[in-house]
Image (spheres, rainbow, N blue to C red):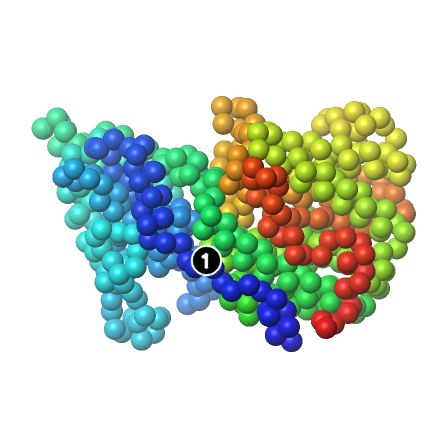
Amino acid sequence: MFAEAVAKLPPQPAPTSISEFRERQERLTSQFRNDDVFILASPPFAVHSNDVEYRYRTSSDLLYLTGWSEPESVFVLRYDQGSWVSTLFVQPQDTLKEIWEGRRPGTDGALADHAVDEAYNNDELSVRLSEWLNDTKRVFLRGGANAEVDDMVERAIRKRDRARQHFGSGPVSLEDPSGLLAELRLRKSASEIEQMVYASKVASLAHELAMRHSREGVTEYQLQSIIEAFFSYAGTSGWSYPSIVGCGENATILHYTTNQDTCNFDEVVLIDAGAEYRGYASDITRSWPISGTFSEAQREIYEIVLRAQLAAIDACQVGAPYTAPHEVARRVLAEGLIELGVIQQTVDEALDMETGELRRWYMHNTSHWIGLDVHDAGVYKPGGTPRLLEPGMCLTIEPGLYFGAWRPDVECPERYANIGIRIEDDVLISTQGPVVLTEDCPKSIEDIESIVGVSFG
Ligand code: GLY
Ligand code: MN
Ligand code: MN
């Protein structure tokens, strides 16, 4: 079923090199003082139900700095005898546990192919931290990631507090490194972009497969299963966020994930689904008629959203504020709805955040950063001013219009009742103009109508 689709994929890219992980660590430590220590713990397992855990996914910061994805690990950077030393504390090898749960790379595995100078079993963390924090002034700790490690660091600091009283030394402040890491992660390297391109290509084909399998009577969960099965088949780790598959009025619910309804002939289905590859997210939304042909009303709304999306992508230029695509998209949407008679205000009135009617039908932002997290790290308004776009930044462009006839707060125009359209692509900012990472995913009305309900071939 998937062979033809997977044949369209390029070879998987090379993983990020050890030297690049070292460079990332150096960019971080170059902002530290020599008496700082940086501590980053993996998050604990999340429980699904008795004796069952969710598939483990480590923190994006840890993936960014080391590529290490194993649970119960802690990464430390400290300055020692003239240079920065990177250390990974890892799960100890344990034959009985490995028989049940899977092999553990252990310290040898960590040292073999990761950007770390030292590796220890994690049961050594407490003792070594106490020692390393002796001469430390600032501890950079991403608090809240792992309560056990937070406690351990606090205990070590309290111990040093007592030492400070006696000897006048010991750590004095605890700082959050999130801002420093977010700033690094905001600009993607060539290798990161390669991983994102692969995730985007897989997700694009998955959407195309779902289009091809759309027909009257298909269920939302069947379309979801095609998409998510293809994510795995194509070698990704699965979804980067729970798939949204909503037909009819469900398409007007922004984060609908129930995915249990049956699709009717005259409905639009909205699918917002992305694959994760080596930790990197893709995030695509497409909306199409189950019948394979847009009705006039569906086409009217789709054309406005598409126009808004293309204009917003054009606004993704180096030096533009990150808000530019949102402003452009809102204006095109407002103009379109005024033309259709849905809004009876002027464009400027319609755009007003308090009294404008656009917000009834378009109530979310157009963009978010994307990378290791689907809603990726990066301050949008440093110092209160919108960030200017730079080469290497990646963001989504995802305008939509949602006419929920079920909503008690507005009167939905009957002609557009229960039409929900969102079109979302992932865009890389470059000096050559915007690069649409998800460009393979069908988007024009002609392409969609020629694909929906038609098998590969
Ligand atoms: N898939 C979530 C979003 O589009 O932001
Ligand atoms: Mn998105
Ligand atoms: Mn999305």
Please tell me whether mark 1 sits on a helix, a strand or a loop.
loop
Extreme residue in the front direction: 432
Residue at screen point 89% across, 39% down: 340
Tell me which corner region of the image, top left, top right, bottom left or bottom right, holds residue 164: top left
Out of 251 and 32, give the one closest to the viewer.
32
x and y, in percent, of residue 344 in the image: 88, 30
Q: Is residue 45 visible?
A: yes
Q: Disc 1 residue type? A: Arg
110 sits to left or right of 433: left
Residue drawn 88% across and 49% down? Answer: 297
Q: Nearer the viewer, residue 1 or 407?
A: 1
* Residue 150 can be seen in this image: no
Residue underneath mark 1: 278
Viewer-side residue, 34 vs 133: 34
Left or right placement of residue 146 versus residue 258 in this view: left
Q: Is residue 80 above or below residue 447?
A: above
Whole-percent x, y for residue 388 in the image? 55, 29
Name the residue rendered at 81%, 46% in the picture.
303
Residue 233 % position (x, y): 55, 70
Q: Please state the horizontal and vertical placement of residue 343, each as a whole percent of the image.
A: 85, 34
The N terminus appears in which quarter of the rendering? bottom right
Which residue is drawn at the image coordinates 77% and 35% (left, top)?
Answer: 332
For the residue carrying disc 1, how many other residues have a C-alpha within 10 Å: few (<14), some (14-19), or many (20+)? some
